[in-house]
C-alpha cells in the first residue's frame, strides 16, 4: 500500500475527494467505521478498516465498496496501516531531504521559520498547521510530491514510544530538538522521561544523519550522547554566522547574520532561539546566508503565537498554547517591553500537567508576583494554586502588590476586563489551548467611546 491510483489520504469522511483513501480510525468520541459508507459515497477509491471492528458489518461494507467500484482493505490495526502507508509512500522520494523537528515548545514556529528560509531556494514541503501527531505526521507526509526537494516536519508526542514510531515513518536526515520542558509531563511523569522520549527522534540514524542540539538546554549533553551520526549544537554562542541581536521590543529584533543586519519580526528571547534553531536547519540543508536572511525577514507570527495586536490597547496574543516554560518566557518578554502604560497579564490554566499541575501553577503564581504586572487575571480552576502562591508572595513582601482577579467563567472574565482596561494598556494573553483566551480579543479592542473611560478602582 497505498493502493495505486490514490490521490489523497484522509481520516475525516467530510474531506473525502474522489480518489481518496479513507482510513477508519477509532477515536475516543467517534468511530471512523461508521463513516466508511459515507466516504465511498463521496468518492473514496479505497478504505482501511479494522478487521475486528467490522466482524458484523464487514459484509455489508464490502458490498457498499463494490457498488462504488472501491476497494475495502481490512487490516489488523488501521492506525498502523496509515503509518505504514506513509512510510512506504516516503520511500518513493529517496532524494527528498527529510527534516524532523521535535521539542517541548517552539516546534511549529521553528518549522515555519526554517521553511521560510529553505523555501527561498529549494522546493519545500512542510506539515500544514501542526499536523504532528501519530495520525497528523503520516497524513502530512502524503503532501510530498515529486518536485519537492526538502520536507520539513514537526513531530509531537503524547505518549511513551510515539516518537520512535514517528521517526520510523519519517527517517529524518536532519533532526532537531528545540528544548526539553514540562509540556505533557502529566503523561510522561518526569522531565528525564520527556528528554528520553524526544531523543528517540534520532533512533533511525545510521551514521550519515545530523542531530541538531540546543546548546543552551540543561539536557544538551544527554541529548547529544551516543548518536549514530553527526552532532551539531545551535544557540547564541555556538554559531559563528550569528553576530548578535538588538531587541526592538514588540517589533521583534534586528539580527546580524554573516555580517549583514536583518529584521526579524517575532519578538522575545525565545523567538531568537527559535530563529537560530531554524537557521541551524537551513545551513545544514544547505541554503545560502542570503536565503537565511530572506527567510528571517519574511516570517510573520502565526495565530496565537507572539502576535502583537496594536490598538488603543496593545495585545500580546500568545494564547495558542501554554506550559510552565512558555509562560515564564512570555512573562519575561512582556516585562522586557518598554511601556509607559499599565501591564495587564491574563493567565489561563496550563493543562495536561497531571500531578505536576499544582507545583507548576504555584511557580507561575510566584513569577507573576515578582513580574512587572499592574494587574493579573487568572482564568480556569487549575490556576487556583497560582492565585494562592501569588497572594503569599505578595504578602511576604517579595513583590510590589499588583491587583489580582480570578474567574472560572469566560463571560465574567470578559466583563471584568472590559471594566478595567483603558487606552494605553498592554495586555498579555497566555493560556493553554483549552482556555481559548483569544475570545477576549474583541473585548480588548476598545470602541472610541470606551478609550477615554475611567478605570474603576480595584482592590
Ligand atoms: P509547539 O509547536 O511546540 O507547540 P509553537 O511554536 O506552536 O510550539 O509555540 C507555542 C507557544 O510556545 C508559543 O506561543 C510560545 O509561548 C511558546 N514557545 C515557543 N517557542 C518557545 C521556546 N523556544 N521556548 C519556550 N517557549 C516557547
Image (spheres, rainbow, N blue to C red):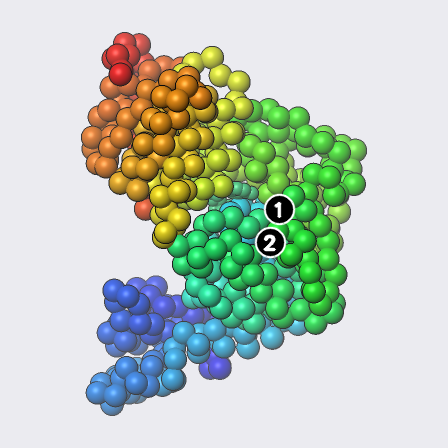
* Quarter occupied by the C terminus: top left
- Residue at horizontal 39 percent and vertical 80 percent from the top: 77
Residue 43 sits above or below residue 101 on the image: below
Left/right placement of residue 302 relative to residue 229 reads left
Residue underneath mark 1: 217
Q: Nearer the viewer, residue 2 or 336?
A: 336
Q: Which mark is residue 450?
A: none
Q: Nearer the viewer, mark 2 or mark 1?
A: 1
Check if mark 2's residue and mark 1's residue have beta carbons within 8 Å.
yes
- Residue at horizontal 51 percent and vertical 48 percent from the top: 181
Total number of numbered discs in the rendering: 2
Residue 145 visible? The answer is: no
Q: Position of residue 74 (x, y in %)?
A: 36, 85
Residue 141 sits above or below residue 221 on the image: below
Q: Secondary structure at mark 1?
A: loop
- Residue at horizontal 44 percent and vertical 76 percent from the top: 80
Q: Position of residue 326 (x, y in %)?
A: 48, 40
Q: Nearer the viewer, residue 223 or 176?
A: 223
In terms of sequence position, does the residue under pointer 2 or pointer 1 come before the other? 2
Query: Can you tell which quarter of the image residue 438 is in?
Result: top left
Q: Nearer the viewer, residue 187 or 234?
A: 187
C-alpha distance separating marks 2 and 1? 10 Å
Left/right placement of residue 273 relative to residue 128 reads right
Q: Position of residue 125 (x, y in %)?
A: 57, 58
Amino acid at each position: 500500500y497505498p493502493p495505486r491510483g490514490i490521490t489523497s489520504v484522509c481520516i475525516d469522511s467530510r474531506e473525502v475527494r474522489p480518489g481518496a483513501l479513507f482510513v477508519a480510525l477509532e477515536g475516543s468520541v467517534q468511530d471512523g467505521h461508521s463513516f466508511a459508507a459515507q466516504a465511498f459515497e463521496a468518492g473514496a477509491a479505497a478504505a482501511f478498516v479494522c478487521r475486528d471492528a467490522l466482524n458484523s458489518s464487514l459484509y455489508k461494507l464490502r458490498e457498499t465498496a463494490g457498488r462504488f467500484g472501491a476497494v475495502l482493505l481490512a487490516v489488523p490495526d488501521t492506525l498502523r496501516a496509515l503509518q505504514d502507508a506513509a512510510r512506504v509512500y516516503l520511500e518513493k522520494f529517496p532524494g527528498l531531504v527529510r527534516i524532523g523537528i521535535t521539542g517541548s515548545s517552539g516546534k511549529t514556529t521553528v518549522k515555519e521559520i526554517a521553511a521560510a528560509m529553505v523555501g527561498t531556494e529549494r522546493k519545500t514541503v512542510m506539515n500544514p498547521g501542526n499536523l504532528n501527531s501519530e495520525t497528523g505526521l503520516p497524513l502530512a507526509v502524503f503532501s510530498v510530491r515529486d518536485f519537492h526537494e526538502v520536507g520539513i516536519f514537526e513531530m509531537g508526542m503524547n505518549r511513551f514510544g510515539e516518537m520512535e514510531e514517528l521517526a520510523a515513518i519519517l527517517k529524518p536526515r536532519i533532526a532537531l530538538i528545540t528544548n526539553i520542558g514540562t509540556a505533557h509531563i502529566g503523561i510522561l511523569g518526569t522531565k528525564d522521561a520527556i528528554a528520553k522520549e524526544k531523543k528517540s527522534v534520532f533512533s533511525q540514524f545510521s551514521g550519515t544523519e545530523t542531530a541538531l542540539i540546543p546548546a543552551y538546554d540543561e539536557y544538551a549533553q544527554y541529548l547529544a550522547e551516543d548518536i549514530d551520526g553527526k552532532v551539531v549544537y545551535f544557540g547564541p554562542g555556538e554559531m559563528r554566522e550569528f553576530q548578535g541581536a538588538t531587541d526592538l521590543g514588540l517589533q521583534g529584533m534586528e539580527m546580524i547574520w554573516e555580517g549583514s543586519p536583518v529584521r526579524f519580526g517575532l519578538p522575545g528571547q525565545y523567538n531568537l532561539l527559535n530563529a537560530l534553531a531554524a537557521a541551524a536547519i537551513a545551513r545544514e540543508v544547505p541554503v545560502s546566508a542570503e536565503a537565511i536572511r530572506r527567510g528571517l525577514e519574511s516570517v510573520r507570527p502565526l495565530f496565537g503565537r507572539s502576535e502583537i495586536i496594536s490598538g488603543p490597547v496593545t495585545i500580546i496574543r500568545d494564547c495558542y498554547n501554554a506550559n510552565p516554560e512558555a509562560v515564564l518566557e512570555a512573562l519575561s518578554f512582556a516585562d522586557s517591553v518598554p511601556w509607559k502604560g499599565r501591564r495587564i497579564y491574563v493567565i489561563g490554566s496550563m493543562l495536561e500537567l497531571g500531578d505536576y499541575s499544582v507545583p507548576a501553577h504555584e511557580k507561575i503564581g510566584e513569577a507573576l508576583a515578582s513580574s512587572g504586572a499592574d494587574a493579573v487575571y487568572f482564568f480556569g480552576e487549575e490556576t487556583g494554586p497560582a492565585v494562592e502562591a501569588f497572594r503569599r508572595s505578595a504578602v511576604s513582601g517579595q513583590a510590589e502588590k499588583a491587583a489580582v482577579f480570578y474567574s472560572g467563567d469566560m463571560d465574567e472574565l470578559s466583563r471584568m476586563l472590559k471594566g478595567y482596561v483603558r487606552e494605553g494598556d498592554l495586555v498579555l494573553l497566555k493560556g493553554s489551548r483549552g482556555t481559548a483566551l483569544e475570545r477576549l480579543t474583541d473585548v480588548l479592542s476598545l470602541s472610541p467611546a470606551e478609550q477615554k473611560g475611567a478605570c474603576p478602582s480595584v482592590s
